[in-house]
Amino acid sequence: MTAPARGDEPWYGAGRDLAPAVPIVEINRASRVYRMGEVEVPALVEADLRVEEGEFVAVVGPSGSGKSTLMNLIGCLDRPTSGEVRLGGTSVADLDDDGLARVRSRFVGFIFQAYNLLPRTTALENVAAPLLYQGIGRGERLARARATLERLGLGDRVGHQPSELSGGQQQRVAVARALVTDPPLILADEPTGNLDSHSGAEVMALLRELHRSGRTIVLITHDADVATTATRQVHIRDGRLVA
Ligand SMILES: Nc1ncnc2c1ncn2[C@@H]1O[C@H](COP(=O)(O)OP(=O)(O)OP(=O)(O)O)[C@@H](O)[C@H]1O
Ligand SMILES: [Mg+2]
C-alpha cells in the first residue's frame, strides 16, 4: 500500500488500495410496480440496499413481500420502475437487453428454489450451458462443467438428466451451474425451499463454504433459521426493506 503522494490529489488518488471499496451491489430508492391491466401492484417500494464484496446477506421476509422482485432487480433479470441498480459500481440503467444479459452472465450466479435445470438434458450439459454465452469452445465448456460437478461431489452423475437425480442432487447441479462461470456474486432465492432438511443443510453448507472462499452471497429466504447462516440480515415486508 502506498500513501498519497501529493496533497492536490484526492486522498484515494495514489493507489487503488486506498480507494473506498465500491459496493458490489447498490440499490438506490428502487421501486418495482407490476401493472395488471388497471391495477398497479407496488411489489418493491423505494428500496435502498448496499452489499459489500465478501458479504453474506440474507433477505428475509414472508411470502409476497417482494423478495424475488428484489432478487430479479439485483440479478438484472428485471428493471426497476424507478430508482437505480448498480453492480460493481456501474449503473445498469443504460444497458439494453443484450447488455443486461452480458452483465448477468459474467457477474451473477443464480440458484433458484425449483432448480430451473433444463429438462431432458444431462447434468454436464446443464452446467456447461452458461459458458456458451461467454463464447467458450465446447471442449473447454464440458471440461469446466465436469470439474465443477466433481468439486460438488457429483462426478458420478454427470450423465444423469434432472429427472434421474434427487432434489438435493438437482440443487447441487444448479449450484455447479451458478459457479461454473466463476461469478463474484451468488444470488440464491429460497435454495432450500424444495429440499428435505438434510439436503437443505448440505446446500447451506455449500453456500457457507463459498462465502469463506471470498464470494459475495445474497440469500433470499422466508425461513428465519436458514437466514442465521448469513452474516447480515435484511428484512423485507410489504415491498419495503426494514432494518
Ligand atoms: N409478474 C408479476 N405481475 C404482477 N404481480 C406480481 C408479479 N410478480 C410478483 N407480483 C406481486 O408482487 C408482490 C411481490 O412478489 P414476490 O414474488 O417478489 O414475493 P416473494 O417475497 O418472492 O414471495 P414468495 O416468498 O412467495 O416467493 C406479490 O404481491 C406478487 O403478487
Ligand atoms: Mg419469491
Image (spheres, helix red, strand yellow):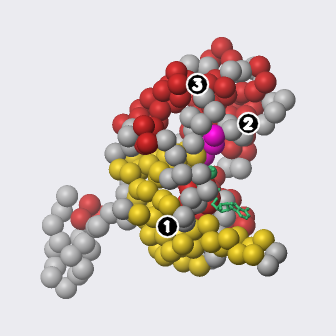
**Label 3 vs 2, first from the N-terminus:** 2
Q: Quadrant of ligand 1?
A: bottom right
**Label 2 vs 1, first from the N-terminus:** 2
Q: CA distance from mark 1 to mark 3?
A: 30 Å
Circles 2 and 1, Cβ within 8 Å, touching? The answer is: no
Residue in the picture at 59% in, 51% down: 63
The amino acid type found where label 1 is placed reads Arg
Q: Residue 81: x, y in percent? A: 64, 76
The amino acid type found where label 3 is placed reads Asp
State the SS at label 3.
Answer: loop
**Magenta-colored span:** 109-113
Q: Quadrant of residue 124?
A: top right
Residue 178 seen in render = no
Front residue of 208 and 100: 208
State the SS at label 1.
Answer: strand
From the image, tell me which residue sits under label 2.
117
Q: Quadrant of the C terminus?
A: bottom left
Q: Residue 235: x, y in percent? A: 43, 56
Q: CA distance from mark 2 to mark 1?
A: 31 Å
The amino acid type found where label 2 is placed reads Leu
From the image, tell me which residue sits under label 3.
196
Residue in the picture at 78% in, 37% down: 118
Is 91 colored magenta in this rendering? no
Circles 1 and 3, Cβ within 8 Å, touching? The answer is: no
Q: Quadrant of residue 139?
A: top right
**Main SS, magenta residues:** strand
Front residue of 131 and 222: 222
